[in-house]
Image: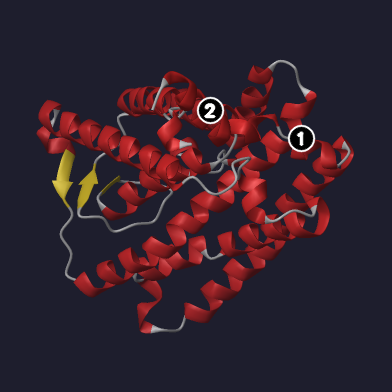
Amino acid sequence: MNGRDNRMELFARTSYLSSDPIGKKLPLRYWIAGFFFIELVWTFVGGAVTYLSMEGTRDFPWSSASWTMYLNQHVNFLVLFAAVAFFTHAVVRIPLRRYVTDAPQFRWKLFWLAALVWLVGIGIATVVTIVIEPQAVMVNTTNRLWDRLLLMTLALVFTPLQCIAEELLFRTTLWRMLEPRLRRTWIVGTISGIVFTVAHLSNVEVQSTSFSLPILLYYFLSGVLFMEMTRSHRGTEAAFGAHIANNLFLVLVVNYSGSSLPSDPWLIQQAPVIWLDLMVLVVCSHIIIRYGSNARFQ
């Protein structure tokens, strides 16, 4: 294949980048109203579903099991996902797949690239933590192995659902709403970072420390960088992959004491090493943004 053929193939793969923006399908006020509608449905209907789930499991022997607590905290994401899907189909009037990405089809290669990069990054960070401070990471023993295995089975379903639902709201919807209207694209990332940070202010990590600025910075940069993944690749596939890989690693492999994410992993860390988490976030995001644009991932 000569150079001209290579250019033609790349153009064929990326011609969707010049398509009309979905954000222009609705006036800005409709997008804003839709965003708050989704938030309100998630808050009140999702809260009601969580309450019913907790009440429904309260009188059973497994009410205090790790998998029950995990399920009760994650069942509300079914509501969030349904609210975004309803808004997409009933208001924006496009298929959810079209809402997620400008590409002709969902780019699984881009998704798996992001997931793999993130798993390698967070895995290296865990090894570094063990080498620097061996006592900081311990084997998480349990006498309720079946409870752990059941939680992990549930996590393979509900953790991806949680991450996808959050990305659809905090990245895809804000991207569709704001990017066609803002010349300075960094403002879109900044808004995403602020909204994502505000959404996590009630997390245990923020509330349980008197010096929460580094943790808030982590949430803010997550919003900024995941939005940049979405914006630069014209779709949310990479953000899906990175977010799912990060949360599955926490639930299945190693989490830290006092985490807002209920889990029963094989390893437990005394506390998050926030400077290392920030390094993983920035480096892995840069790799995904830089190399995800390669034609073979498009």
Query: Is residue 119 shown left or right of residue 220?
Result: left
The quadrant in which the N terminus is found is top left
Q: Amino acid at mark 1?
A: Asp
Query: Is residue 162 shown left or right of residue 120?
Result: right
Q: Is residue 144 above or below residue 294?
A: below
How many numbered discs sit on the rendered protein?
2
Disc 1 to disc 2, C-alpha distance: 21 Å
Residue located at (89% from left, 38% from top): 27
Residue located at (23% from left, 47% from top): 268
Under tag 2, what secondary structure?
helix
Q: Is residue 119 above or below residue 98?
A: above
Which dot marks residue 112? none
Residue 69: which quarter of the image?
bottom left
Q: Amino acid at mark 2?
A: Met
Residue 186 in sight in this render: yes
Q: Is residue 205 above or below residue 265?
A: above
Determine which residue is flagged by label 2.
Answer: 8
Q: Nearer the viewer, residue 132 or 167?
A: 167
Which dot marks residue 20? 1
Whichever of labels 1 and 2 marks the residue nearer the N terminus, that label is 2
Q: Position of residue 274 (x, y in %)?
A: 35, 27
Q: Nearer the viewer, residue 213 or 93?
A: 93
Residue located at (28% from left, 32% from top): 121
Under tag 1, what secondary structure?
loop
Query: Is residue 162 shown left or right of residue 171?
Result: left
Q: Is residue 204 above or below residue 230?
A: below
For the rendered model, the colour scheme is secondary structure
Instruction: Tell me if mark 2 has few (under 14), some (14-19) or many (20+) residues whose alpha carbon lies within 10 angstroms of its own.
Output: few
